[in-house]
Image (cartoon, rainbow, N blue to C red):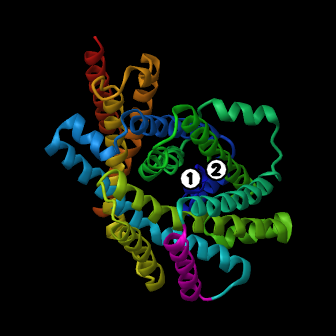
Amino acid sequence: MWSVISAAFIGPGTVTTAVTAGSVFKLDLLWAVVFATLACILLQEVAARIIIATGLNLGQALTQHFGLLRGRVYQYVIGGSVLAGCAAYEAGNILGAVSGIQLMVGGEVAVITIIITLLAFLALWFGNPKWISNIMMMLVIIMGVAFFWLASSHSFSLQQFSVAAVVPKIPLGSEMVVLGLVGTTIVPYNIFLGSGISKGQTISLMRLGLTISVLIGGLITAAILVAGTVVNQFSSFPELYDVFNTKMGLTGSLALALGLFAAGFSSAITSPYAASIIARTVFGVEDKMRIRWVWMIVLFTGFFFGVSGIKPIPVILVVQALNGLILPMLTIILILLVNNASLIPKMYRHSILYNLVLLVILGIVLLIGLSSVDKALMSTFKNTQAHFEIILSITVLVVMYVGWVIWRRKV
């Protein structure tokens, strides 16, 4: 089951961001991939541990902690926003798979889009969780082989890799790329996926499966970044295909196309699948047909925008702004829930050091979230002035407040 997490890790957006990071900044931003991978493991571990420890789904845990009214508000705000994000970005997932097919064999966008959507529909309609997991495992293997082969053409030493992986660098102009690398790795629906498939497992098995799966996703993201160092600039996948064809031959360009298809198709399945898990774990939907309607709406929203050629820019900007706030809000809620002594039995609680690490992660994702909101607003109102000092001040105040709340509960 945990192969779903690896597959959900890598989508067309991840490929674009990681290739951009590698082509412009070479190995300088590899540390951001390492940080995001470790942070993703910790946040998903907390979400899964809450469900295992309490025997409740996330929606039930919210109502127990915050009360019925506030709990329901958080359910609809968080769950609704993440569902909207799944639908808004599904077109990009489908078109990523379409781009991979086009690079390999050509063909009409509309025809390939219909085929990709139909295949995803059949996998979701007829596939049980184990079967979907097996499909995802196959796609992860394809991605891994393709991108690791592309990364093998690098000329860096082991020492250079080691330094780049642990020493943070933020070269001039790389700020948004760093935020993008972290933001494309720690996404809300990944957290819901991990918590949703952990119910009924032991803590040790959950941690093992989760850690291996997320590490695989992180390694593939790192391989994509390293592969991107081969090119000097990146503006489109056809252009990238031509560059790899020139520098690495037909095998290199086909590896790119195959990896892009696997990334897009796996995300085209996992995004609707995550929506169905959110319906169950947040809203408590158990009826099989109602759950199917949830993932069908997500899938066919993506299909509509993909096949019509319409760019849902206003919708994406709104959802981007919402999701920019949802991940920090979800992180705060997870920290509060896992520190609730009346909800979490003593044997499942963690140390003060774990809390400190979670607060650092909260600071990073809040900085990313507020920057995403700021970027979305600037795009909407055609404004070019950033507000980093204000965003940083808000971030510090929020982290300090959350730290004070959990400290007060422990003393």
Magenta region includes residue 20:
no
Q: CA distance from mark 1 to mark 2?
A: 8 Å
x 30%, y 50%: residue? 78
Residue beneath disc 2:
221
Provide the secondary structure element on which disc 1 rests: helix
Residue occupied by mark 1:
9
Amino acid type, callout 2: Thr
Which residue is nearer to you in this view: 195 or 314?
195
Q: Is residue 175 left or right of residue 401?
A: right
Dominant SS type (magenta): helix
Give 98 or 158, whichever is nearer the viewer: 98
Would you place residue 267 above or below residue 189 in this image?
A: below
Residue 314 in picture, x, y percent from top left: 32, 69
Q: Residue at x 34, y 25 (%)?
A: 339
> Is any atom of residue 386 visible in this view?
no
Name the image quarter holding residue 55.
Answer: top left
Q: Quadrant of residue 278?
A: bottom left
Residue at 38% in and 61% down: 85
Which residue lies at the image location 60% right of the left edge and 38% below the top edge? Answer: 211
Evaluate if marks 1 and 2 touch, with contact meaning CB atoms under 8 Å apart.
yes
Give the magenta range.
Answer: 108-127
The foreground one among 381 and 162 is: 162
Relative placement, left or right, of 133 versus 292 is: right
Question: Where does residue 307 sit, x and y in percent of width and height?
Answer: 47, 84
Q: Callout 1, which amino acid? A: Phe
Q: Residues within 10 Å of mark 2 (few under 14, many from 20)?
A: many
| As drawn, 218 above or below 113 | above
**Residue 93 appears in the figure:** yes
Nearer-the-camera pick, 79 or 228 = 79
Tell me if mark 1 has few (under 14), some (14-19) or many (20+) residues whose alpha carbon lies within 10 angstroms of its own: many
